Amino acid sequence: MKKLQILGTGCPKCKKLAENTEAAAKELGIEYELVKVSEINEIMKFGVMMTPALAVDGEVKLVGKVPAPADIAAILE
């Protein structure tokens, strides 16, 4: 099971990234857990200075943008 973490304070872009990530994971048919990390101190532990960001299994894969579900699927595969 992949742990997908959305790093962001709950802004519209953060919500969109969560939606697109979930759509990508469902499209791929992978088992996943989607976790929203909104605490600034927790986000900073990832070394992320710009949100939204996506971490997969604790590793940051995307920062500061909201790609389409297809682009996120390529990262998750």
Image (cartoon, helix red, strand yellow):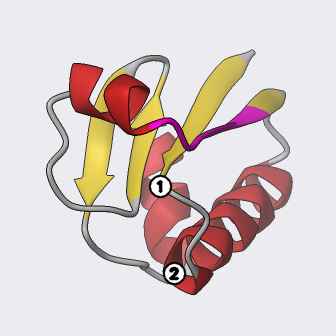
- Identify the image quadrant of residue 35: top right
| Separation of marks 1 and 2 at Cα, in angstroms | 9 Å
Q: Earlier in the sequence, mark 1 or mark 2?
A: 1
Please provide percent x and percent y for residue 20: 66, 72
| Amino acid on which the number 2 mark rests in the picture | Lys
Please provide percent x and percent y for residue 17: 57, 69
The front one of 2 and 28 is 2
Whether residues under marks 1 and 2 lie with C-beta atoms below 8 angstroms apart, the answer is yes
**Residue corresponding to mark 2:** 13
- Identify the image quadrant of residue 51: bottom left
Question: Badge 1: how crowded within 10 Å, few (<14), some, or many (20+)?
Answer: many
> Magenta span covers which residues?
34-39
Question: Badge 2: how crowded within 10 Å, few (<14), some, or many (20+)?
Answer: some
Q: Residue at x 64, y 60 (%)?
A: 21
Please provide percent x and percent y for residue 69: 60, 75
* Disc sitting over residue 30 in the figure: none
Q: In this image, 2 relative to 43: left or right?
A: right
Query: Image height check: is 64 above or below 25?
Result: below
| Amino acid on which the number 1 mark rests in the picture | Gly
**Residue corresponding to mark 1:** 8
